[in-house]
Amino acid sequence: MTEKQARTAANVVMAAAALGAAVFVLRSPKLRRMAWQMARHYARGPLAVWAAGSVRDAWDASAAASTSAAGRAS
């Protein structure tokens, strides 16, 4: 078995496991509520911090680009 075949086989196994876990969670009301609660918690915490950081980085990059463009024009 080549490395490429091994990676493909591993990807198929991981996808099947993820799909099986998703079906299991979605069929159980208790687990479904817990999954949504965790998703909302993640959206309020780490995801919001990451988004704010990305916006700030983009803001800084655009300011640096406009400053260097203004310096070349003069």
Image: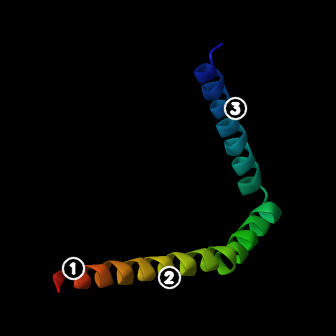
Q: Answer above or below: position of 19 versus 41.
A: above
Which residue, given by chain and number where applicable, does mark 1 sit on? 72
Picture quadrant where residue 32 is located: bottom right
Judged left or right of residue 30, residue 73 is: left
The label on residue 13 is: 3
Whether residues under marks 1 and 3 lie with C-beta atoms below 8 angstroms apart, the answer is no
Which residue, given by chain and number where applicable, does mark 2 sit on? 56
At 63% across and 28% down in the image, what residue appears?
Answer: 7
Task: Name which of mark 3 and mark 2 comes first in the sequence.
Answer: 3
At 55% across and 81% down in the image, what residue appears?
Answer: 52
- Residue 20 on image: x %, y %: 72, 42
Query: Toward the viewer: 48 or 39?
Result: 48
Picture quadrant where residue 65 is located: bottom left
The label on residue 25 is: none
Nearer the viewer's eye, disc 3 or disc 2? 2
Question: Disc 2 on helix, strand or loop?
Answer: helix
